[in-house]
Image (cartoon, grey):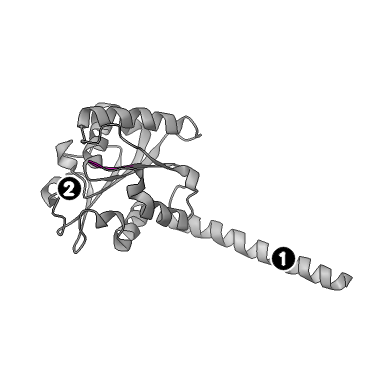
């Protein structure tokens, strides 16, 4: 009986020894800085639940649920002036709970324009490392990406809400996909793979 207990304990130790480092190794190989929280920014009429599928994907690659923060704009009309200011305050609150001084942002639709105004007019450049927009109405905010931020714009030729000409922006890594509608940019597995890749670059 004693030898059986020892064998079981030995097996348990081996499982722990090989499973935990493997997970850590996978995170390191992804190139993603998991210490930086992610802020999810919705568009007109949107809400935090819009990012449910993306949050699930991010948790599957190693993010903790507590490090994913989805803003809920009080003004659902996409007002660039008010929303960019609320985003500034929200990010300040998020960073107050961390030992890092930058977040990464994933924004959908008008959330892209709100994010760009925050970056260029409200000092956001110093508090943001990476921005990824999905069908972002980016050029409603600015005509080019400010230096100091790694910016990726993912957009679709099948998007009937936000045109490619609004999403493409100078200074960004502009990524064109096809066959994905405006709302499907939030749930497409192909787009989610591009998000993960962009976070790791």
Query: Which badge, 1 or 2, comes first in the chain's sequence?
Result: 1
- The answer to whether residue 157 is left or right of residue 89 is left
In the image, is residue 93 part of the stretch drawn in magenta? no
**Residue sitting nearer the eye, 108 or 75:** 75
- The answer to whether residue 35 is left or right of residue 50 is right
Q: Does residue 10 show up?
A: yes
Residue 79 drawn at (x, y percent): 20, 32
Residue occupying the point 47% across, 29% down: 96
Residue occupying the point 15% across, 38% down: 140
Residue occupying the point 55% across, 59% down: 23
Secondary structure at badge 1 equals helix
Name the residue carrying label 2.
Answer: 167
Q: CA distance from mark 1 to mark 2?
A: 51 Å
**Residue sitting nearer the eye, 147 or 194:** 194
Magenta region: 41-45
How many C-alpha atoms fall within 10 Å of the one at disc 2: few (<14), some, or many (≥20)?
many
Residue 128 drawn at (x, y percent): 35, 37
Callout 1–callout 2 Cβ contact below 8 Å: no
- The answer to whether residue 143 is left or right of residue 173 is left
Q: Where on the picture, by quarter, is residue 169?
A: top left
In the rendered image, the quadrant that contains the N terminus is bottom right
Name the residue carrying label 1.
Answer: 12
Residue occupying the point 61% across, 63% down: 19
**Residue sitting nearer the eye, 171 or 10:** 10
Majority SS type along the magenta span:
loop
How many C-alpha atoms fall within 10 Å of the one at disc 1: few (<14), some, or many (≥20)?
few
Q: Where on the picture, by quarter, is residue 156?
A: bottom left
Secondary structure at badge 2 equals helix
**40 over 22 or under it: above or below:** above
**Residue sitting nearer the eye, 160 or 131:** 160
């Amino acid at each position: 009986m004693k030898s059986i207990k020892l064998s079981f304990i030995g097996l348990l130790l081996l499982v722990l020894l090989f499973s935990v480092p493997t997970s850590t190794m996978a995170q390191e190989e992804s190139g993603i800085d998991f210490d930086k929280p992610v802020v999810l920014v919705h568009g007109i009429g949107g809400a935090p639940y819009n990012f449910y599928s993306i949050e699930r994907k991010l948790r599957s690659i190693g993010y903790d649920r507590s490090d994913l923060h989805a803003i809920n704009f009080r003004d659902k009309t996409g007002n660039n002036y008010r929303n960019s200011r609320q985003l500034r305050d929200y990010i300040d609150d998020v960073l107050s709970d961390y030992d890092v001084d930058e977040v990464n942002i994933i924004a959908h639709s008008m959330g892209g324009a709100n994010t760009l105004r925050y970056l260029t007019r409200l000092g956001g450049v110093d508090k943001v490392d990476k921005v990824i927009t999905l069908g972002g109405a980016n050029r409603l905010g600015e005509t080019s990406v400010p230096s100091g931020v790694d910016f990726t714009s993912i957009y679709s030729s099948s998007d009937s809400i936000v045109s490619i000409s609004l999403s493409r922006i100078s200074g960004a890594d502009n990524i064109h996909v096809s066959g994905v509608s405006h709302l499907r940019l939030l749930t497409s597995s192909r787009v989610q793979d591009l998000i993960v890749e962009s976070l790791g670059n």
